[in-house]
Image (cartoon, helix red, strand yellow):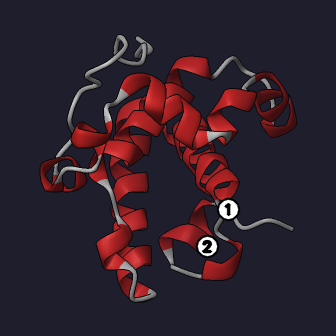
Amino acid sequence: MKPGIAEFDAGRLDPAEFSHEEHIRMGWLYLVNLGETDGTVRFREALKRFTKSVGAESRYHETITCFFLHEISARIDGSDWSGFRATNAELFDGKTLLDRHYSPETINSPHARQHYVAPDRASAPKQSN
């Protein structure tokens, strides 16, 4: 069984199994179960704790995290994870989606790593109401 919010909050994940897809799934779980505002705050906090606990704190990227949470939130349609996964394939090719919205200079900047920076190429992800 895949880990859920409680396991992620407690940092009980195998870093070797925390792929990009697992990042998306975990973000989806937080947003579906806690709503956009609380889910975003809690996921960001848990991800920061997790990266710190595994010695990968420098890998946390605020802009990428927030961008994907906005994208996930805008696409939530009431389906289960399998349905969401099947209808949102572009979320799982993260580099292509990021390249469409961010120039390399922006996404690779130290400022974007520490603070959310709005997309500088295409329009910002839609936010749900």
In the image, residue 27 above or below residue 55: above
Amino acid identity at mark 1: Gly
In the image, residue 33 above or below residue 14: above
Residue 7's tag is 2
Q: Residue at x 64, y 69 (%)?
A: 18
**Which image quarter holds the N terminus?**
bottom right
Seen as rendered, the residue at the extreme front is 104
Q: SS for tag 2?
A: helix
Q: Residue at x 32, y 18 (%)?
A: 121
Quadrant of the rendered structure where residue 86 is? Answer: top right
Amino acid identity at mark 2: Glu
Q: Can residue 45 be spotted in the picture?
A: yes
Seen as rendered, the residue at the extreme left is 111
| Residue 2 at x, y percent in the picture | 79, 65
Asked whether the residues under the numbered discs 2 and 1 touch, taking CB atoms below 8 Å apart as contact, a structural biologist would say yes
Q: SS for tag 1?
A: loop
Quadrant of the rendered structure where residue 12 is? Answer: bottom right
Residue 82's tag is none
| Residue 20 at x, y percent in the picture | 62, 55
Residue 4's tag is 1
Asked if residue 79 lies left or right of residue 67, the reply is: right
**Which image quarter holds the C terminus?**
top left
The CA span between labels 2 and 1 is 5 Å
Q: Residue at x 29, y 25 (%)?
A: 119
Asked if residue 84 lies left or right of residue 41, the reply is: right
Residue neighbourhood size for the residue with mark 1, other residues' Cα within 10 Å, grouped as few (<14), some (14–19), many (≥20): some
